[in-house]
Image (spheres, rainbow, N blue to C red):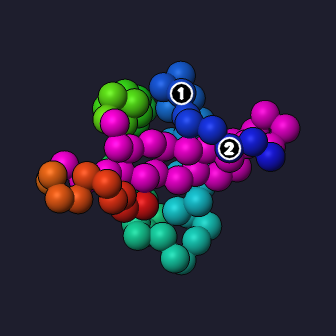
Amino acid sequence: MNIRPVKKEEAEELLHLIMNVENQSEFMLMAPGERQMTLEKQTTMIEKVEKQENAVILIAEKEGVMIGYLFALGGSAQRKKHSAIW
């Protein structure tokens, strides 16, 4: 297994993975069908995170297939820029 930052060219694959996880799990914040994400929005989000110093989207892949993801998004307030939510 390999864990690394996602590339914007992988936006579609990440979007499909997120939707699959939400459709299969009862423990995700968004219920199946609730997330209104498009490929364009996903690509824009990846680009925004790439530019942010205290944020990253990590993916886990096995044999070239994306199998997991983690969003770590840092705050913008000076006193909490060092912390992230996931």
Residue 85 location in percent, x, y? 36, 61
Element carrying mark 1: loop
Q: Main secondary structure of the magenta part?
A: strand
The mark found on residue 3 in the picture is: 2
Residue drawn at (52%, 62%) of the image: 22
Q: Read off the residue under disc 1.
A: 7
Q: Amino acid at mark 1?
A: Lys
- Label 1 environment density (alpha carbons within 10 Å; few <14, some 14–19, many ≥20): some
* Residue extending furthest toward the right: 63
- Label 2 environment density (alpha carbons within 10 Å; few <14, some 14–19, many ≥20): some
Toward the viewer: 85 or 8?
A: 85
- Compared across the picture, whether 27 is left or right of 68 comes to left
Q: Amino acid at mark 2?
A: Ile
Residue 60 location in percent, x, y? 68, 46
Residue 25 against residue 9 in the figure, above or below:
below
Alpha carbon of mark 1 to alpha carbon of mark 2: how far? 12 Å
Span shown in magenta:
53-76
Q: Is residue 10 magenta?
A: no
